[in-house]
Image (cartoon, grey):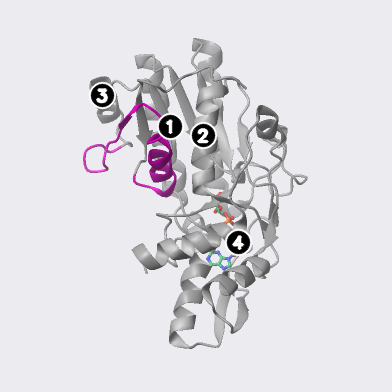
Amino acid sequence: MTEAFSLAGKRVWVAGHAGMVGSALVRRLGRENCTILKATRKELDLRRQADVETWMAANKPDAIFLAAAIVGGILANESHPAEFLTDNLQIQTNIIATADKLGVAKLLFLGSSCIYPRLAPQPLKEEYLLTGPLEPTNQWYAVAKIAGIKQCQAYRRARGRDFISAMPTNLYGPNDNFDLASSHVLPALLVKAHQAKLAGAQELTVWGSGNPRREFLHVDDLADACVFLMQRYSADEHVNVGIGSDVTIRELAEMISAAVGFTGKFVYDSSKPDGTPQKLLDCSRLHGLGWHAGTSLPDGIAATYKWYLENAA
Ligand code: GFB
């Protein structure tokens, strides 16, 4: 597919540049001939509309990757419903509405596979959006992300803006959150397996039943897909971004233990929630455009463990 929107010579704002997704985007955009704009949290509170307007008017982005969000694993979502709903709505609304006001040429909004109904058929096609009830543990975050898709569509229709949305599956990689209380499952199990190995422990605690199925995409693959979509995609419909296969949490724990060298057994903590039974994206739309993920899960886990040892352990 041809490149309809060139990033060459453009001022490109990565909103949320310090996070796992934003920092992957900054790495990937280093290969494009563009000027990357960043605003630290100290410089700009994205929840404050007037501050966002002032910063954007002064910095004049031509294109925006909207990767800024309050994110977290299943427990963080359950424990902070107000922040996951309100802060995310504020951040995305301020940026999208100001991008419209200033006539920003292109914007890509990032969502999540939790936008789909809890019991939607698998793999999840884009058209399953709003066809059933959401997963209760992350409904607050999901509602904000669904609103973001609709905001992009609304500005496309009403104002002719080239705002698009990408919906990644569960992500992992460098700069992930490795805090056990608020992280997602993959970094959590990496830390737990590593600490259990060091302590010579015989057991590792896995939350829930181990039966839920999840699909895991390396964040560098997501960044590559986002740049691809920014350059080549322009339509109302959001686009799923995944790897095409999923594993049970039990299988994930086994893969991580093998990578880390933990040889003990798993104990399942049924006081913790399972969440959605399965989340596997149908990526036919993205594959049809010509993009495929390049990192296998075992390779991605090995690379992330190496990164963790060198940077965060
Ligand atoms: O990754 P995770 O926190 O989020 O949990 P979701 C995935 C599964 O792993 C759940 C289990 O069934 C957890 O119970 N799990 C097992 C663990 N051990 C652990 C552990 O030590 N830590 C964690 N965190 N989980 C999130 C949503 O859902 O996914 C967000 O809450 C977002 O809104 C994100 O969509 C991508 O996949 O269940």
Q: Position of residue 18 (x, y in %)?
A: 34, 46
Q: Of the residues tagged 4 and 1, which is closer to the observer?
A: 4
Looking at the image, is mark 3 or mark 4 earlier in the sequence? 3
Q: Amino acid at mark 2?
A: Cys
Mark 1 touches mark 2? (CB < 8 Å): yes
Looking at the image, is mark 4 or mark 1 earlier in the sequence? 1
Q: Amino acid at mark 1?
A: Phe
- Gap in angstroms between the C-alphas marked 1 and 2: 8 Å
Q: Position of residue 174 (x, y in %)?
A: 43, 54
Looking at the image, is mark 4 or mark 2 earlier in the sequence? 2
Magenta stretch bounds: 18-45
**Residue nearer the viewer, 220 or 86:** 220
Query: Mark 1 highlights which residue?
Result: 65
Q: Position of residue 50 (x, y in %)?
A: 26, 27
Q: Amino acid at mark 4?
A: Pro
Q: Amino acid at mark 3?
A: Asn
Mark 3 touches mark 1? (CB < 8 Å): no
- Gap in angstroms between the C-alphas marked 3 and 4: 41 Å
The secondary element bearing badge 4 is classed as: helix
Q: Residue furthest top?
A: 159
